[in-house]
Amino acid sequence: MTTDATLNKDELRELVADALDVEPESLTDEALFIEDLDVDSLVALELAVTLERRYQVKIEEAEIVQIRRLPDVHDLLVRKLAG
C-alpha cells in the first residue's frame, strides 16, 4: 500500500474534523487548530490516538505539540507511513 493510497486528503479531513469535533468545512488548510478551532490539549491527544488507530503509527507527544494545521497532520503521517 502506498502512502498516497493510504492518505486520502478528504478522508483525512473528515477523520480530523470528527476527532476535533468541528465541521469538515471549517477545517481548511489554513485553519489553526488552537487559535481558530479552539482545540485544547485533551482534544489534541484524542486526535493523536485516532490517527494512531486509523493509520497504525505511533505519534510521540513532541510531535503532537507541533501539529497546528491540517497540512501538519498530513505531513506527519506521510513521514510516519514512509517509515
Image (spheres, helix red, strand yellow):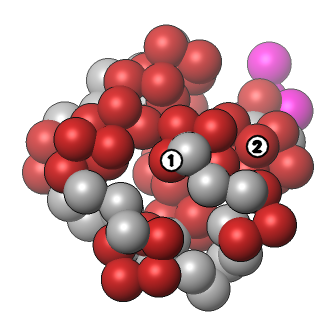
Disc 2/disc 1 C-alpha distance (Å): 10 Å
| Observer able to see residue 82 | no
CA neighbours of label 2 inside 10 A, class few (<14), some (14 to 19), many (20+):
some
Q: Secondary structure at mark 1?
A: helix
Residue furthest to the left in view is 62
Q: Is residue 59 above or below residue 43?
A: above
Question: Residue 83 colored magenta?
Answer: no
Q: Quadrant of residue 33?
A: bottom left
Q: Nearer the viewer, residue 47 or 79?
A: 47
On the rendered structure, is 14 left or right of 55?
right
Residue at 48% from the left image edge and 25% from the top image edge: 50
Q: Is residue 60 above or below residue 44?
A: above
The numbered mark at residue 74 is none
Which residue is denoted by mark 2 in the rendering? 14
Residue at 51% from the left image edge and 55% from the top image edge: 73
Q: Position of residue 61 (x, y in %)?
A: 14, 42
Question: Residue 3 colored magenta?
Answer: yes
Main SS of the magenta part reads helix
Q: State the extent of the magenta-drawn residues as a range.
A: 1-5
Q: Position of residue 53 (x, y in %)?
A: 49, 13
Residue at 58% from the left image edge and 64% from the top image edge: 70
Q: Is residue 59 above or below residue 68?
A: above
The numbered mark at residue 20 is 1
Q: Amino acid at mark 1?
A: Leu
Residue at 71% from the left image edge and 71% from the top image edge: 26
Q: Nearer the viewer, residue 18 or 61?
A: 18
Q: Amino acid at mark 2?
A: Glu
Q: Secondary structure at mark 2?
A: helix
